[in-house]
């Protein structure tokens, strides 16, 4: 029966690799190292810069796929495949790896303790395991902002200046009212979707999320999570969303043709607007989100334990993630620095981009971080988050009634966590 | 004919069994046949049996590929039985299987009948065209179909809108997403099945049809009383193969709605059993739970295959 080879064997063969324990990468020449990144974050630019400064070093960069696909490939590699020397891990995927620190080089043995004071303490601490091993060095953080179309706002009779727009929505309730005004004036949806643009934004504005600081699960009892969830359901009931899921086909197209006028824009998202909708240059603006503070995302560089050339990888981390390099990365690629000094200087605060009509992007993103009180992420953070956002999307699609949404979300999370 | 039968009859008389030949038979010749068939069993053991047994072993553990492995007995299976996501995947798998297999076999039968027509021009061209969907990459097919059936910008919904209808949200509607996945399966496999039927059709002697025509049977009667009965073995074969294929539908639901990850829709509208297995095993890295799904799926396939076997033997007995 074909099935045996197809389904059962895939799991078993993968696991079989674990038992045989294939050794790590061969070739111990210290001039070459393998680097896995995800797409869309432009690590190519970083690598090119590094190669230019060090012509004798060869960096083999592989862009594996999405953040999740990269984490999957890394897990499979750690379980018994060929590991890279250096890997980029997205913030939401990190806790699972931090919970199993034995798979990685403890960077404090390489000298991470000497540089730790350069980085925002709460960002740094997320990569420190229970046994005090330092699993990763933060490359960037996900300051939050709201991107909107100035031309569509004007057409709807709303102000279009970023400061005036920010003044329209001090709270999420105000934000929904602005959306209602827009819909009333134009008859078109205001927001791309409630899942990423409301729920994921609000749930990343809390000071306690799905876990207590001690690592206890509180997603079902934490009023802050409930509040974030309810406001996203409220946005759906207000009829202001276009029900276009982030990263879907219609989402990319919708940015160009005005299918929605506003969307969540954490620092790393801004680049995707420029890539997906190059024709709308000058029409977008960036302003603060309701309640201002928050962090969504960010990434870390880590070195797997079986890496063939950890020294070369560490040299790369140290140089490319130094405070000076991160500042340069920000202006070059838009990755918002995770270093302390960057926020003490004016380099971020003064940053603008003509694509976004010279909105004070750096100021907006920086402010969201300065006012933000960090929360603890646990190994199941990503799982809980996707179960909850899927419920929001399902309410938006009309499959789950809004009054049953919370119960459905809690049930989805419990199923995902194993009853 | 008799001249051909004669020599074997004479053979025993000519060579009576002797002691010498028996000795020669015992050593290499006795083992040679096993050696000849050994490659199959070795390959089966390595790629079939060992993974199967190992999957079962893993399913008894809480198995973190980069952390600890804890023995938990049959807990994964009790959890599976109580997991609504599993039963949802089961429903989706069987629904998609039925609404893809039935039309596929019927359409293939009709097409094969048409292609078998004596006076068809460019017959070879048409027959080769049948295989084009089959050799197209599943991933490419899925991406194109997902765009054609997109709610806001898909060609199909554009046409519906053009004629005044409301756009259909295939991906967010349960039956809609079943339909979309099934449509891709039909598109891909119909040509292949058609060629199987066509080969069988061409093996039917033409004089049977001629005799029927002489007796006054028209096209439809010929089809019902000659074609379909002659195709019965190949129809049973295609039902069995498409059952196995249908229970394993994976790539289409994986790629049709990538915005929601590995669930084929926010509410797991079209998540099949294999995709659920993949989500648990390689999305969540719960290898133990994923293996338990694999074992369950194996049992399901065996049961369905047995059912197929009994049904097909019964139809044969009824003839």
Image: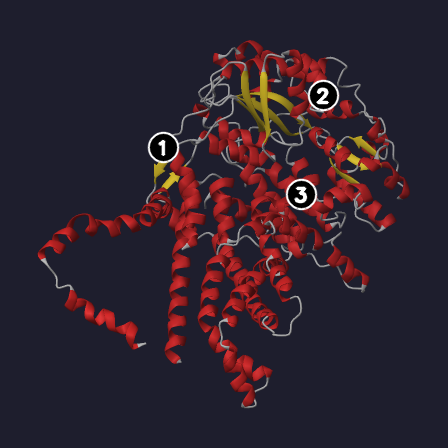
| Residue to which mark 3 is pinned | A195
B73 up-or-down from A296: above or below: below
Which secondary structure, mark 3? helix
Q: Position of residue A381 (x, y in %)?
A: 55, 35
* The one of A131 and A206 positioned closer to us in this rendering: A131
- Looking at the rendered image, the disc whose residue lies closer to the viewer, 2 or 1, is 1
Residue at 74% over, 21% down: A332
> Can residue B233 be seen at all in this image of the molecule?
yes
Tell me the chain of label 3.
A
Asked if labels 2 and 1 share a chain, the reply is yes
- Looking at the rendered image, the disc whose residue lies closer to the viewer, 3 or 2, is 2
Asked if labels 3 and 2 share a chain, the reply is yes
- Looking at the rendered image, the disc whose residue lies closer to the viewer, 1 or 3, is 1
Q: Position of residue B97 (x, y in %)?
A: 52, 61
Instruction: Report how far apart the C-alphas of labels 1 and 3 lie in the structure.
Output: 43 Å
Q: Position of residue B268 (x, y in %)?
A: 57, 52
Residue at 65% over, 23% down: A140
B82 up-or-down from A40: above or below: below
| Residue to which mark 2 is pinned | A330
Instruction: Report how far apart the C-alphas of labels 3 and 2 lie in the structure.
Output: 27 Å
Residue at 54% over, 33% down: A71
Quadrant housing residue B155: bottom right
Quadrant housing residue B269: bottom right
Query: What is the total number of numbered labels drawn onto the structure image?
Result: 3
Tell me the chain of label 1.
A
| Residue to which mark 1 is pinned | A20
């Amino acid at each position: 029966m074909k099935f045996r080879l197809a389904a059962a064997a895939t799991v078993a063969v993968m696991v079989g690799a674990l038992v045989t324990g294939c050794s790590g990468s061969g070739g111990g020449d210290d001039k070459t190292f393998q680097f896995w990144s995800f797409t869309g974050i432009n690590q190519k630019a970083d690598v090119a810069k590094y190669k230019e400064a060090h012509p004798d070093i060869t960096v083999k960069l592989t862009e594996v796929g999405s953040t999740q696909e990269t984490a999957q490939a890394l897990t499979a590699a750690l379980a018994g495949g060929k590991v890279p020397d250096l890997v980029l891990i997205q913030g939401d995927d990190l806790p699972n790896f931090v919970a199993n620190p034995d798979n990685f080089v403890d960077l404090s043995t390489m000298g991470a303790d000497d540089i730790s004071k350069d980085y925002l303490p709460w960002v740094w601490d997320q990569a420190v395991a229970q046994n005090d091993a330092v699993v990763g060095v933060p490359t960037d953080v996900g300051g939050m902002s709201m991107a909107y179309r100035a031309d569509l706002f004007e057409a709807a009779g709303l102000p279009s200046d970023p400061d005036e727009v920010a003044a329209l929505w001090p709270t999420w309730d105000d934000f929904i009212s602005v959306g209602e005004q827009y819909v009333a004036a134009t008859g078109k949806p205001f927001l791309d979707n409630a899942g990423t643009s409301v729920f994921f934004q609000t749930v990343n504005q809390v000071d306690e999320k799905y876990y207590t600081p001690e690592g206890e699960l509180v997603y079902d009892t934490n009023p802050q999570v409930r509040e974030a969830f309810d406001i996203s359901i409220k946005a759906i009931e207000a009829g202001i969303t276009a029900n276009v899921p982030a990263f879907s086909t219609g989402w990319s197209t919708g940015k160009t043709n005005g299918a929605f006028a506003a969307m969540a824009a954490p620092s790393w998202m801004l680049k995707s607007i420029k890539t997906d909708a190059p024709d709308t240059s000058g029409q977008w603006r960036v302003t603060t989100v309701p309640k201002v503070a928050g962090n969504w995302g960010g990434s870390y560089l880590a070195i797997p334990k079986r890496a063939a050339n950890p020294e070369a990888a560490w040299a790369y981390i140290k140089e490319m993630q130094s405070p000076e390099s991160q500042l340069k990365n920000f202006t070059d690629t838009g990755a918002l620095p995770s270093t302390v000094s960057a926020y003490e200087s004016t380099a971020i605060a003064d940053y603008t981009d003509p694509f976004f009509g010279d909105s004070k992007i750096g100021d907006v993103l920086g402010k969201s971080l300065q006012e933000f009180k960090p929360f603890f992420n646990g190994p199941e953070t990503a799982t809980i988050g996707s179960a909850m956002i899927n419920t929001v999307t399902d309410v938006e699609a009309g499959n789950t009634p809004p009054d049953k949404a919370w119960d459905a979300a809690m049930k989805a999370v419990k199923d995902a966590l194993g009853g | 004919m008799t001249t051909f039968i004669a020599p074997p009859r004479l053979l025993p008389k000519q060579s009576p069994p002797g002691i010498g030949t028996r000795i020669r038979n015992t050593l290499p010749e006795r083992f040679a046949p096993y050696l000849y068939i050994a490659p199959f069993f070795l390959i089966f053991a390595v790629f079939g049996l060992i993974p199967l047994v190992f999957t079962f072993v893993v399913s008894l553990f809480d198995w973190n590929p980069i952390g600890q492995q804890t023995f938990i007995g049959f807990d994964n299976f009790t959890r599976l039985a109580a997991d609504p996501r599993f039963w949802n995947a089961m429903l989706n798998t069987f629904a998609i299987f039925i609404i893809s297999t039935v039309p596929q076999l019927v359409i293939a039968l009709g097409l094969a009948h048409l292609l078998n027509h004596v006076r068809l021009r460019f017959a070879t061209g048409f027959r080769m065209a049948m295989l084009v969907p089959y050799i197209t990459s599943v991933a490419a097919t899925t991406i194109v179909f997902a765009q054609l059936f997109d709610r806001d910008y898909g060609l199909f919904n554009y046409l519906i809108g053009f004629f005044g209808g409301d756009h259909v949200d295939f991906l967010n509607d349960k039956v809609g997403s079943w339909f979309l996945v099934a449509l891709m399966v039909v598109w891909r496999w119909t040509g292949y099945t058609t060629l199987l039927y066509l080969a069988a059709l061409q093996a039917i002697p033409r004089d049977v049809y001629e005799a029927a025509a002489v007796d006054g049977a028209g096209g439809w009667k010929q089809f019902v009383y000659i074609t379909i009965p002659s195709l019965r073995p190949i129809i049973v074969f295609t039902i069995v193969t498409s059952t196995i294929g249908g229970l394993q539908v994976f790539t289409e639901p994986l790629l049709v709605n990538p915005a929601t990850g590995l669930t084929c829709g926010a509410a797991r509208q079209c998540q099949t059993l294999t995709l659920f297995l993949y989500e648990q095993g390689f999305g969540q890295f719960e290898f133990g739970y994923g293996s338990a799904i694999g074992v369950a799926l194996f049992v399901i396939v065996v049961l369905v295959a047995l059912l197929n076997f009994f049904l097909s033997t019964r139809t044969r007995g009824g003839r």
